[in-house]
Image (tube, rainbow, N blue to C red):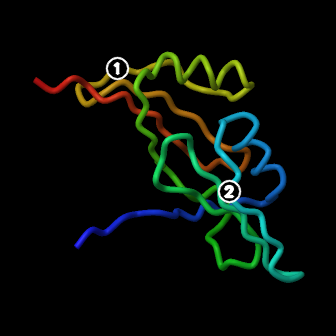
Amino acid sequence: MDWKLELVSVPVSDVDRAKTFYTEQVGFVADHDHQVSDEVRFVQLTPPGSACSIALGTGMGQAEPGSVRGLQLVVADAAAARDELAGRGVEVSEVQDFPWGKFVFFADPDGNTWALQQLPVWG
């Protein structure tokens, strides 16, 4: 039986600001944005090429805004991904080279942190 991770909740303080950051600056696709009731809003965003999405919203019992650390995306080229994000106004780290891959780090406006990893060529 497959167990597939398909949705990760990312707690934010301002859903509209976060949605704009993730779609316009980071390049995620906006899949859903539903105002279920006056108290509940559900926004689902997906990184390009990913089978897993993130959920932003209100009234969903999320953790404190900015409390998610170390979400990770795998990219083919860390330097190109860094240049793309920087070109869209995202504050990103320089490319860091480790034995387990090249990494670039950034945070959303609430402080939730992300890593982009370029996997090494395993021999």
Q: Position of residue 101 (x, y in %)?
A: 30, 27
The quadrant in which the C terminus is found is: top left
Q: Which residue is mark 2?
A: 31
Disc ID at residue 23: none
Q: Amino acid at mark 1?
A: Asp
Instruction: Identify the image quadrant of residue 5.
Output: bottom left
The quadrant in which the N terminus is found is: bottom left
Up/down of 70 relative to 63, above or below: above
Q: 70 and 36: which one is in front?
A: 36
Instruction: Identify the image quadrant of residue 4.
Output: bottom left
Q: Is residue 11 left or right of residue 36?
A: left
Residue drawn where x is 48% and y is 56% of the image? 52
Classify 10 Å Cα crowding around label 1: few (below 14), some (14-19), many (20 and above).
some
Spatial CA distance of label 2 from label 1 is 33 Å
Going from the N terminus, do you reach mark 2 or mark 1 first? 2
Q: How many marks?
A: 2
Q: Which residue is mark 1?
A: 97
Q: SS at mark 2? A: strand
Q: Amino acid at mark 2?
A: Asp
- Which of the two marks, 2 or 1, is nearer to us in this view? 2
Q: Position of residue 69 (x, y in %)?
A: 51, 52
Up/down of 38 relative to 18, above or below: below
Q: SS at mark 1? A: strand
Q: Is residue 75 left or right of residue 55?
A: left
Residue drawn where x is 40% and y is 26% of the image? 76
Residue drawn where x is 45% and y is 22% of the image? 78
Q: Position of residue 51 (x, y in %)?
A: 46, 53
Residue drawn where x is 31% and y is 69% of the image? 3
Q: Position of residue 25 (x, y in %)?
A: 72, 34
